[in-house]
Amino acid sequence: MDNEIWQDREFPEGEKQDTDIRTEWERDYARIVHSSAFRRLQAKTQVLGLGDSDFYRTRLTHSMEVAQIGTGILRFLQVNLEEKDQQEILSSLPDHMLMNSICLAHDFGHPPFGHGGEVALNICMREHGGFEGNGQTLRLLSKLEKYSESNGINPTRRLLLGVLKYPAPYSALVQKNAYSKLPAQPWLSSAKLQTPPKCYLDDERELIEWVLKPFSDAEKKEFTETIKDGEKMHRQTIHQSLDTSIMDLADDISYGVHDLEDSIELKLITRDDWEGNKKIAECKEYVNENFPYDYETLTNNLFSGESFRLKKSIGDLVHHFISNISINYSRMTEASSPLLKWNAVLKKDTNKFLDAILSIVTDKVIKSPSVQQLEFKGQKIIIDLFTALASDPKRLLPEGTKARYEQTNSDHQKKRVLCDFVSGMTDEYATKLYERLFSPSKGSVFEII
């Protein structure tokens, strides 16, 4: 595989300094960890709302854990492939620093207030190309971060391919009948019926063409194909690159296992919830046959009330999932490039167990009234902020964003500038700006938000 082309950056940067001995992947990593988008993740909701406790995960700690698991998967695969002398796959695996970068950046584009913020911005941008958090990640990396004037951190081609979870644009996936009619007050919309398709944004078409340039026409055609599962469903992408498949597994493992830990510590999931969950119960024999201890011991450790026993069990779960990952042929029939030919996969029975953990977190936490109420509040805050800023942008926008707004010509691009601004807010910044604009008792010219 020609590694050099995957280290290319879209915009030439000139010669490195003689004393700069870093690889291109190390340079990507440095730009990510020093970016403002990375710092903002510390004040963006992961699952549970910020401010209620200092214990549970934020988007930042989640991203760091995904990076740790992602590099753990990579190391496990390397050892196994070396033992089996599978050199083609081994030589195709990403560099550890590249894997770190992909995982750390994977949630850059998620807006404040979690899913509620994403739905709100998609409603606001409905007639202007929509909004989706994964697509916004590409914009931040390639356009909005201020390492350069207008090219973001100017990332390498392979980094962008790695964070491209859904290789089709909004316009190719959106189905109008998947959305319900918007009420007179859009913030009262059902989130489930206003969710965007998983995609990249149409404004990034040229960028994605550049990213996919090393592949053959047949590979590009198959890699970007889509399917439709139901009449009132958005279309969906099918394929991922090798690097993305590793990151996606790391994300699922972290999302399931670590959010389970938070939920148990905060007593949002009890032993009765665990033992009464049908999908968990179906995995008892799997645990008995594949774990170093039986299901009863695992359950006792998770719900002992002793943090060190919970932490040990969480670590055992993570290790178990990592050690059941292998590299298989992807579902692509036209792939000759190793980056499309291979995918990391979790064993079928193991994946069923992970899905069971994800399901109990979803049912008992994410769908709980307390979490959904906070998402609903965030939905209203974001729609109200966007509407206010769009009503008089030259009056209300901060100077830097106002300059970008005034430099654009079309209404579409002006709305995208507003969307970039709002999506980049932290939960706290959005709340404070909302209070400044709408609360009679809040706001001061001397208050920095």
Image (tube, rainbow, N blue to C red):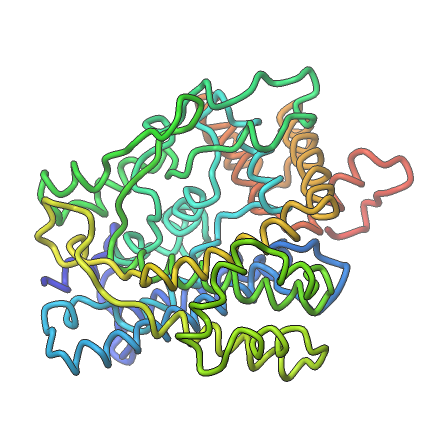
Image location (x, y in percent) of residue 59: 56, 59
Q: Nearer the viewer, residue 102 or 271?
A: 271
Point out residue 356 in the picture as x, y percentages from the top left corner.
50, 57
Q: Position of residue 324 (x, y in %)?
A: 33, 70
Quadrant housing residue 115:
top right
Vertical placement of residue 334 versus 52, above or below: above
**Quarter where residue 285 is shown:** bottom left
Q: Nearer the viewer, residue 260 or 191?
A: 260
Q: Residue furthest right?
A: 441
- Residue lying at 61% horizontally and 68% vertically, measured from the top left: 261
Quadrant the N terminus occupies:
bottom left
From the viewer's perspective, is 428 left or right of 394?
right
The residue lying at 59 percent from left, 79 percent from top is: 311
- Tell me: 104 left or right of 21: right
Residue 357 shows in the view: no
| Left or right of residue 349, residue 207 in this image | left
Farthest front residue?
A: 285
Q: Is residue 377 above or below residue 19?
A: above
Image quarter of residue 119:
top right
Q: Is residue 51 above or below residue 183?
A: below
Residue occupying the point 33% across, 33% down = 169
Disc tally is: 0
Residue 335 screen position, x and y as percent: 11, 49
Residue 408 in view: yes
Vertically, is 391 above or below 164? above
